[in-house]
């Protein structure tokens, strides 16, 4: 059941990405640590592919909304698993798990057709 409109998803994408970029400082994670790098990489990646998505808030329609949502689910799974994959679960991987599960939910609950219809994707 896809109930989140793509315009709202776009707003959340940029906010979510910014929060992930700010998370290492806000959570006082050690600079350069795996947990800080994972958060920043996820945030930067989310903003980058949001800008390249064919939806209302995208800047260049390179990715379809379906591709974007697949990246949300895959990236969310990787972020949620990162505390165990990168060995920082015992130091506190809760925020990574929460952000990752949020991304998965957003990917599964957002409609895959933007209100403007499909634009011609850049080739």
Image (tube, grey):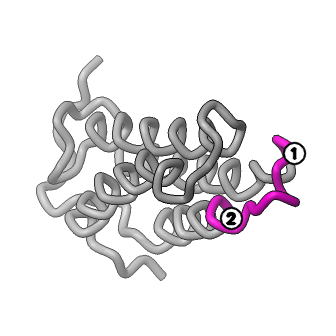
Label 2 crowd bin: few (<14), some (14–19), many (20+), radius 10 Å: many
- What residue appears at the point 70 percent right and 48 percent down from the top-left corner? 78
Count of numbered tags: 2
The residue wearing badge 2 is 97
The circle on residue 87 is 1
Main secondary structure found in the magenta portion: helix
Viewer-nearest residue: 98 or 114: 98
Figure check: 52 above or below 25 = above
Element marked by disc 2: helix
Viewer-nearest residue: 83 or 46: 83
Q: Which residues are magenta?
A: 85-97
User: Residue 82: x, y in percent?
Assistant: 75, 48
Disc with the residue nearer the chain's start (1 vs 2):
1
- What residue appears at the point 56 percent right and 46 percent down from the top-left corner? 39
The circle on residue 29 is none
Q: Is residue 109 rendered magenta in the image? A: no
Label 1 crowd bin: few (<14), some (14–19), many (20+), radius 10 Å: few
Would you say 40 lies left or right of 46 here? right
């Amino acid at each position: 059941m896809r109930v989140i409109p793509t315009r709202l998803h776009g707003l959340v994408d940029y906010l979510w990405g910014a929060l992930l970029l700010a998370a290492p400082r806000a959570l006082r994670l050690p600079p350069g640590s795996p947990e800080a790098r994972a958060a920043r990489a996820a945030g930067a990646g989310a903003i980058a592919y949001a800008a390249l998505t064919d939806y209302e808030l995208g800047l260049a329609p390179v990715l379809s909304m379906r591709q974007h949502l697949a990246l949300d689910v895959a990236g969310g799974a990787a972020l949620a698993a990162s505390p165990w994959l990168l060995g920082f679960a015992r130091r506190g991987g809760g925020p990574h798990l929460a952000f990752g599960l949020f991304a998965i939910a957003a990917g599964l609950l957002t409609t895959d057709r933007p209100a403007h219809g499909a634009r011609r994707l850049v080739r």
